[in-house]
Each structure stands twice: as C-alpha cells, then as structure tokens.
Image (tube, rainbow, N blue to C red):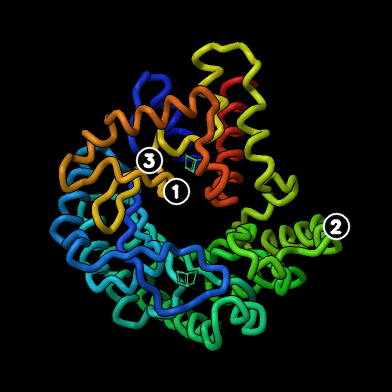
C-alpha cells in the first residue's frame, strides 16, 4: 500500500499516469469448490488462451513500461496453469516483484524449491479459519490439513536453505463459523512462519452464503476481537490489517456515500485527484487469460486485447482514459456498485485516507 501511495504521489507531481501493478489472470479452473467462491465461470477453451510466449512478451512490455509488481492470479486457482513456474521465472528475470495468490493445496516440494530458486517474493495463501472445522466448511474436506502440511514443508525447506523468500501471507475471510477464532490465525501464522494475516470481509455474492454473515452479537463484539488479535500480532511479530475492521467501512452501502462525499467541495484538480472513489485505473492493469485487458478485473468490457495492441497503447487508450474520467467526476459504474469486491472498497478508503493525510494535513 505504501509503495502505491508513493507511486501515485510521484505521478501526480509529474502530471503523468504510469502503471505500477500488473495482474495476470492465468487460469479459470480450480481443484476446490468453495461455497463462497466468486470465480467467474468463463467459457474459455485453451485454444483462445494466451500461450506462454504471449505471456512472456507481456512481461517484457511490462518491464519497459516500468511496472514494479506483478500479481500472478486466476479467476480460479493459478497453480492449475501448467506453465506457472516458467512464467514466474520470467517475471523475476525482469526484476519485477512477484506475488501470487493460491488456495495452497496444489503446492509441493518441487514447486517450493523452484520458487526459492527463482527468488519469488510473496505467496498469499487463502485459509478461512485456524482449524479444519472452520476452514473446511467453506473450502471442502481435507483442505485445511493439506495446506498446513504444505506450509510446514515450505517452512522446513526455507530453514534448511537459510532463505526468507517467498514471504507467506494468509488471506482469511471472516465468517460466522470462525469469528471467535480470529486471534488464533495469528498463532497459527507464527507456528508456520507466515509473516502476515490479511483479513477480508465476506462478500455475500449469493444467497447460499448469507448464513455465514456475522450475527449482530458477533458484530457487537468485533472491537474486542480486534484488540485481542492486535495484541497477539504484536506479541508474535505478525503483520495484520485487522485495524480496517474498526470502522466497518467496507460495507457495500458505504461505497456510494464515499463516492459522493467530496462532490460539493472545491473543484480544484488536486482536490479531485486526492478524493477519488477508486484509484485502480491510475496504477493497475489486469490481463485476462484470453488477452482482454482492463483497468480492473470487475470492469471487463472486452474493448482492449493484448493480441491487437501493446500494453502501453492500452494504458493510454480511450477506454482506460474514459474510465479515469468517470472516476474523476466521482461517478461509479453500475458494475462498481454491484460487483466490486467489498475488500476493494476498504482498500480504496485506506489509499484515499493515506493520500489525503500526506497532502492536506
Ligand atoms: S480455491 Fe479459490 S478459486 Fe478455488 S473454489 Fe475456492 S475460492 Fe474459488
Ligand atoms: S469495480 Fe471496483 S476496482 Fe473497478 S473501478 Fe469500480 S470501484 Fe474501482
């Protein structure tokens, strides 16, 4: 987050717009079937998917464009893509910081040794509870024990090779069945040498997961849980974002309020830029498995495709500029309100607050 803030401020001072983070969405399949999965059921056949050489060409273009971070991700699970390690190797070869997010069940000794050898920077592991009862209710029987077995293996290999990378982060969705166990995620992280626990609010995409929403009673206890978690995180030296839950600002209804809040303020350019409802199109590019390129993966217009244009041309295209213009006039798209993940709303708010505190305090 701090790096992105610095990047945005630097670009603003130079009156330029440059991408910082490239997202590669490399697969649409998964070995699990989690009940809260929002993965898109896209009809893609592998003939229309980008080849490894096309992905490699995108990475070369990204380096030339000055992109600093690359997130290897999927609409589902990235480790179902057979060439993932070759792709990651290429990213590191071009000096770009590499992150990936995975369910952790397909990892193995060979993959860990390759990640260590290429110097991969960070792996986010999705784990929705500190025990099989809370995690596997969401992610399926056996998922918890598989992930823990894999993380113990990675911890031991890193120790043996005296390596600190890749850094491991837990991505944990907070839901009703694990609420009281939130602090235990910190203890589990410490045992497995996981450096950070990032908590996410549950996005209720479908009625079938409504029963996983926190109860009123749980919400009323949230501050106590946050305090306990923070204290443990301090004691065990684990980073966490649990602070964002103090204000409950991630909630869906607040997105539009947030977009509206500065509408009546003075309309100076700097005011406009430092009070946007979303900054993604100012630092982020998302490339889909079939070559479509978007300023965020929720706004998927299909207007630009890497097969027909260079990354730089797309970054400067009418589609990207129109998206920015709309947000500059504080207009969310309908899709932002309907489909943007609640965590993005929390991230936008954190970015917004940081930018404003830097600039206007
Ligand atoms: S692991 Fe991720 S992509 Fe796979 S089913 Fe679960 S939430 Fe969806
Ligand atoms: S969908 Fe979300 S991330 Fe995308 S532009 Fe809208 S608010 Fe930003």
Q: CA distance from mark 1 to mark 2?
A: 32 Å
Residue position for label 1:
298
Q: Position of residue 79 (x, y in %)?
A: 34, 72
Image quadrant holding the C terminus, namely top right
**Which residue shows up at 63% across the image and 39% down it?**
255
**Which residue shows up at 33% across the image and 62% down it?**
120
Circle 2 crowding by C-alpha within 10 Å: few under 14, some 14–19, many from 20:
few
Question: Do the residues under discs 3 and 1 have CB atoms within 8 angstroms?
Answer: no
Q: Which numbered disc, 3 or 2, marks the residue that appears first in the sequence?
A: 2
The answer to whether residue 199 is visible is: no
Q: Which mark is residue 295?
A: 3
Q: Position of residue 130 (x, y in %)?
A: 64, 76
Q: Is residue 312 above or below residue 35?
A: above
Q: SS for tag 3? A: loop
Q: Which numbered disc, 1 or 2, marks the residue that appears first in the sequence?
A: 2
Residue position for label 2:
220
**Nearer to us in this view, 254 or 198:** 254
**Nearer to us in this view, 167 or 51:** 51
Q: SS for tag 2? A: helix
Q: Is mark 3 within 8 Å of ligand 2?
A: yes
Q: Is mark 1 within 8 Å of ligand 2?
A: yes
Q: Position of residue 24 (x, y in %)?
A: 31, 55
The part of the image, by quadrant, that contains residue 8 is top left
Mark in the foreground, 1 or 2: 1
Q: CA distance from mark 3 to mark 1?
A: 9 Å
Q: Position of residue 132 (x, y in %)?
A: 62, 84
**Which residue shows up at 60% across the image and 26% down it?**
356
> Would residue 101 appear left or right of 270 to someone viewing this image?
left
**Which residue shows up at 37% across the image and 60% down it?**
73
Q: SS for tag 1? A: loop
């Amino acid at each position: 987050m701090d790096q992105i803030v610095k990047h945005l401020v630097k670009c603003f001072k130079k009156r330029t717009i440059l991408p910082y983070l490239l997202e590669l969405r490399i697969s649409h399949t998964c070995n699990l079937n989690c009940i809260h999965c929002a993965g898109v059921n896209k009809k893609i056949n592998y003939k229309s998917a980008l080849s490894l050489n096309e992905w490699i060409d995108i990475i070369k273009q990204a380096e030339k464009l000055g992109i600093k971070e690359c997130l290897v991700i999927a609409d589902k699970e990235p480790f179902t893509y057979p060439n993932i390690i070759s792709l990651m190797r290429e990213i590191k070869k071009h000096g770009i910081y590499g992150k990936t997010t995975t369910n952790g069940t397909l990892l193995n000794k060979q993959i860990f040794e390759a990640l260590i050898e290429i110097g991969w920077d960070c792996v986010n592991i999705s784990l929705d509870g500190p025990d099989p009862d809370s995690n596997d209710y969401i992610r399926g029987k056996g998922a918890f024990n598989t992930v823990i077995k894999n993380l113990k293996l990675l911890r031991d290999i890193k120790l043996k090779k005296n390596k600190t990378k890749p850094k491991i982060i837990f991505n944990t969705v907070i839901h009703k069945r694990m609420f009281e166990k939130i602090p235990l995620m910190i203890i589990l992280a410490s045992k497995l040498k996981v450096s950070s626990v990032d908590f996410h609010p549950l996005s209720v995409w479908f009625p079938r997961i409504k029963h996983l929403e926190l109860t009123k009673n749980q919400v009323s206890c949230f501050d106590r849980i946050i305090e306990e978690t923070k204290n443990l995180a301090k004691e065990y030296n684990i980073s966490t974002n649990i602070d964002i839950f103090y204000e409950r600002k991630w909630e869906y209804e607040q997105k539009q309020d947030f977009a509206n809040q500065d509408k009546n303020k003075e309309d100076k350019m700097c005011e406009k830029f430092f009070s946007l409802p979303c900054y993604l199109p100012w630092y982020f590019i998302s490339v889909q498995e079939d070559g479509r390129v978007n300023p965020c993966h929720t706004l998927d217009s299909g207007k630009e495709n890497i097969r027909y244009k260079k990354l730089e041309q797309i970054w400067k295209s009418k589609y990207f500029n129109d998206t920015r213009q709309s947000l500059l006039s504080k207009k969310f798209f309908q899709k932002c309100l309907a489909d943007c993940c609640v965590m993005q709303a929390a991230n936008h708010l954190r970015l917004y607050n940081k930018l404003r505190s830097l600039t206007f305090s």
